Image (cartoon, rainbow, N blue to C red):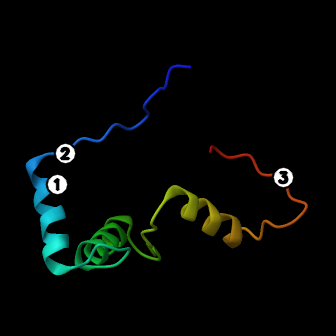
Amino acid sequence: MELIWLSPSYMRVSELQYLQEAFDANWISQAGHNITEFEKSLENYLGENSFVTALSSGTAAIHLALQLLNVGEGNFVICSL
């Protein structure tokens, strides 16, 4: 079976600088200055009544979305793996 890579890693100098900044500040987690600034910037871009939360993975995003939609036992959900 041949693998199809959907999103290969691509790093430029700016990404490496952000990674180094995160290591230097000891913010290798789901929190930190860059994440907070990203959330605020996206809220400003989207405008009034926009609330943004960065999550650690697509799985976490699907889980949160299902909770917000009150999806529970007995519901049928189709999503990617």
Query: Quadrant location of the C terminus?
Result: top right
Tag 1: Cα neighbours inside 10 Å, few (<14), some, or many (≥20)? few
Between 16 and 1, the residue placed more toward the observer is 1
Disc 2 to disc 1, how far (Cα)? 6 Å
Task: Please determine whether, in this image, residue 59 is positioned above or below residue 31.
Answer: above
Above-or-below relation of 48 to 79 = below
Residue at image mark 2: 11
Q: Which residue is mark 3?
A: 76
Residue 31 located left or right of residue 58 = left
Q: Position of residue 5 (x, y in %)?
A: 42, 31
Which residue is drawn at the image coordinates 77% and 71% (left, top)? 70
- Give the residue displayed 29% in from the left and 69% down from the top: 38
Which secondary structure lies at badge 1? helix
Q: Earlier in the sequence, mark 3 or mark 2?
A: 2
What amino acid is labelled 3 in the image? Phe
Which of discs 1 and 3 lies nearer the camera? The answer is: 1
Residue lying furthest front in this view? 1
